[in-house]
Image (cartoon, rainbow, N blue to C red):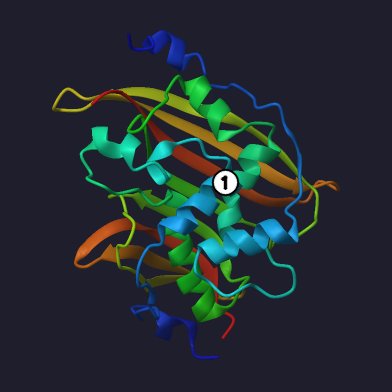
């Protein structure tokens, strides 16, 4: 494994969702037992002024970031996720999860801190930090 | 009629009933599929399960949380953020004991006159032997005047 400090400033390999799928929002709503209609009822959303759209669940937005981290360092690498939800993500949006290594938190356990984000075109819709264990 | 500030602040310290929750394979499979990821190996649960599993495991539903906060309908709830800690990987078919409470509530009026309640709750997941596996803290916005 490389020197841990050499990771600082490294961009994480991105994870792209080519089109946010409204069918997955419906499945997710059922799994979560989420009664909030913004995820599945286009008519209910008319009052929100978002046109004929449904809004992706916040956990799904964060899941794309989790997928990016696991794709990079394996399925058990995530130790902490802190996220702020800045903008809604709609059905059929194209979003890309990305990140950058900020610092080494603990040399002995290879624990590092990363800045994380989810982008739609040039707009950040979710931002935060992740603590992960380097395994590769 | 907006819920009074006194009434909403009284929710601070409200303890959830608590309970035990397992994540079955079918549920994890569908959850992972929703995230567009490949299925994980070794019965590992997708990390995003830390949204609904702690809520349901602590004896509540999202509906009941909405009722506690006295919100309903499109646009009444927003997500501010999450802080989720993973002390051990989550696995399918393990019974996790879930215990949580509302740790903070604050009424906030924005510069342009909008009013919301910042609603914060935290839930611990432990094995039946008491090993702390994960802790979630969720920050919601309950809109009162938009």
With respect to residue A71, does B59 lie above or below? above
Q: Which residue is mark 1?
A: A30
Q: Nearer the viewer, residue A125 or A17?
A: A17
- Spot occupied by residue A18 in the image (x, y as percentages of width and height): 35, 72
Q: Residue furthest left?
A: B112
Q: Quadrant of the N terminus of chain B?
A: top left
Q: Is residue B58 left or right of residue B34?
A: right
Q: Nearer the viewer, residue A11 or A89?
A: A89
- Spot occupied by residue A64 in the image (x, y as percentages of width and height): 44, 65
Q: Residue at x 30, y 62 (%)?
A: A93
Q: Nearer the viewer, residue A105 or A37?
A: A37
Q: Residue at x 59, y 59 (%)?
A: B31
Q: Residue furthest front?
A: A43
Q: Secondary structure at mark 1?
A: helix
Q: Nearer the viewer, residue B106 or B95?
A: B95
> Which quadrant holds residue B7?
top left
Q: Is residue B12 left or right of residue B107?
A: right
Q: Quadrant of the C terminus of chain B?
A: top left
> Which quadrant holds residue A117?
bottom left
Q: Residue at x 49, y 41 (%)?
A: B138
Residue A105 visible within the image: no
Report crowding for label 1: few under 14, some 14 to 19, many 20 or more residues within 10 A (C-alpha).
few
What is the number of callouts on the image?
A: 1
Q: Residue at x 19, y 67 (%)?
A: A122
With respect to residue B119, does B84 lie above or below? below
Residue A14 visible within the image: yes
- Spot occupied by residue B96 in the image (x, y as percentages of width and height): 76, 47
With respect to residue A107, does B84 lie above or below? above
Chain bearing mark 1: A
> Which quadrant holds residue B14?
top right
């Amino acid at each position: 494994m490389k020197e841990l400090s050499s990771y600082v400033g490294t961009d994480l390999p991105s994870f792209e969702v080519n089109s946010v799928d409204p069918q997955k929002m419906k499945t997710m709503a059922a799994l979560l037992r989420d009664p909030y209609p913004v995820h599945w009822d286009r008519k209910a959303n008319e009052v929100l002024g978002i046109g004929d759209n449904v809004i992706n669940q916040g956990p799904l937005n964060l899941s794309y970031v989790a997928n990016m981290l696991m794709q990079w360092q394996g399925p058990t690498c995530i130790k902490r996720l802190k996220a702020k939800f800045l903008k809604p993500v709609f059905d059929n949006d194209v979003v890309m999860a990305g990140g950058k290594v900020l610092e080494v938190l603990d040399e002995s356990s290879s624990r590092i801190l990363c800045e994380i984000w989810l982008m739609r075109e040039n707009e950040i819709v979710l931002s935060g930090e992740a603590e992960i264990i380097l395994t590769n | 009629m907006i819920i009074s500030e006194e009434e909403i602040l009284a929710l601070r310290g409200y303890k959830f009933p608590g309970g035990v929750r397992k994540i079955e394979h079918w549920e994890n499979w569908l959850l992972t599929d929703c995230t567009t990821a490949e299925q994980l190996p070794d019965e590992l649960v997708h990390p995003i399960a830390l949204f609904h599993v702690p809520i349901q495991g602590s004896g509540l539903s999202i509906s009941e949380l909405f009722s506690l906060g006295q919100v309903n309908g499109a646009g009444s709830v927003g997500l501010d953020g999450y802080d989720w800690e993973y002390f051990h990987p989550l696995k399918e078919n393990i019974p996790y004991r879930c215990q949580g409470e509302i740790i903070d509530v604050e009424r906030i009026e924005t510069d342009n006159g909008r009013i919301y309640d910042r609603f914060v709750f935290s839930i611990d997941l432990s094995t039946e032997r008491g090993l702390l596996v994960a802790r979630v803290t969720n920050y919601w916005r309950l809109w009162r005047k938009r």
